[in-house]
Every structure is written in C-alpha cells, then in structure tokens.
Image (cartoon, grey):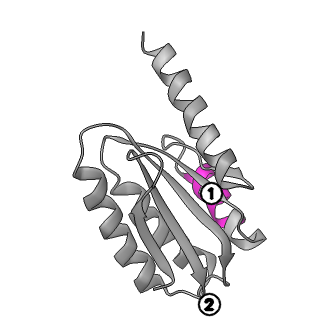
C-alpha cells in the first residue's frame, strides 16, 4: 500500500505516515480513517510525522479537489491531536499544505523538515513549548 500508517518505533505517541510511490485519494481517505482511530485509541497527545520523500505525484486532480480531501482529514482530527510534521514533499504538495494553512487559520500549521530526526526534534520542542505555556 502506498500510504502506510503505523505507530512510531521510538515514540508511542507519534504516528508515522509513509507515502511511497503513486497513490490515490481513496487510499489517502482510507489512511485518514485509520489515523483517526489510532489517535482516538489513546488519551495522550498524538503527533504525526508524514514522510513524503518517496511519494509520487499527487493524484491528477485540481487543487480544489485536493483541498477538499485534505480538509476532511484535518476537520476530523480528535482533540488529542497535536501537530503534523512533514518530511520532504514536492513543490505541489507543499503548495497544497500552504493553502490549507492559510484557509484553516485556527488549525495547527504544518511543519516541514528534511529528516526523520529533525521531525522528532521539532515535535519534542513543540511539546516542551506547549507544556511550558500551559503551566
């Protein structure tokens, strides 16, 4: 399956999404349902690392269709969802996410890094900053 969703091996409060090769919006939707169920299966905060370094092109649709699918994913995130950190990704994928961040001003912004280690570090720092702010 081109979109694999699983718990991270190093941190059980991080979900990894690995996208390899070409994929369809139906596969994306199925992974969204899996993701939501996984987040709801725990009470603590859950963050997402999406590895897009080996992804193929987005399915051939216009940007409004892409945004509709992605908005469904964002709008269905449970209350214990934290942030998404994307690794890699082509220019079109980044543009779609950037557009989503502009449209959904009250949703957490998507972070972009180049390595898995950087993604884990970003989440660690984000959690520490939020813990500090809530005390």
Magenta span: predominant SS is helix
| Residue located 50% across and 87% down the image | 24
> Label 1 neighbourhood size at 10 Å, few (<14), some (14-19), many (20+)?
many
Answer left or right for 116 relative to 1.
Answer: right
Extreme-top residue of the structure? 135
Identify the residue under disc 1. Answer: 86
In the image, residue 129 lies at what x, y percent? Answer: 56, 22
| Residue located 50% across and 29% down the image | 127
| Depicted 101 relative to depicted 4: above or below | above
The span picked out in magenta is 95-103
State how far apart marks 1 and 2 are (Cα). Answer: 21 Å
| Depicted 24 relative to depicted 124: above or below | below
Quadrant of the frame with the C terminus: top left
In the image, residue 7 lies at what x, y percent? Answer: 39, 58
Determine if the magenta segment contains residue 98: yes
Identify the residue under disc 2. Answer: 60
In the image, residue 57 lies at what x, y percent? Answer: 67, 84
| Residue located 60% across and 88% down the image | 22
Q: Secondary structure at mark 2?
A: loop
In the image, residue 59 lies at what x, y percent? Answer: 59, 87
Answer left or right for 18 relative to 52.
Answer: left
Of marks 1 and 2, the one in the foreground: 1
Q: Secondary structure at mark 1?
A: strand
Extreme-front residue of the structure? 10
């Amino acid at each position: 399956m081109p979109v694999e969703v699983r718990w991270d091996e190093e941190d059980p409060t991080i979900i990894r999404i690995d996208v390899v090769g070409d994929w369809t919006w139906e596969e994306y939707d199925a992974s969204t349902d899996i993701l939501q169920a996984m987040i709801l299966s725990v009470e603590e905060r859950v963050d997402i690392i999406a590895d897009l370094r080996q992804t193929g092109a987005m399915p051939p649709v216009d940007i409004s269709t892409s945004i509709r699918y992605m908005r469904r994913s964002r709008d269905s995130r449970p209350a214990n969802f934290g942030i998404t950190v994307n690794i890699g990704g082509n220019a079109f994928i980044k543009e779609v996410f950037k557009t989503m961040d502009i449209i959904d001003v009250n949703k957490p912004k998507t972070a972009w890094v180049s390595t898995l280690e950087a993604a884990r570090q970003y989440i660690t720092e984000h959690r520490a900053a939020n813990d500090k702010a809530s005390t």
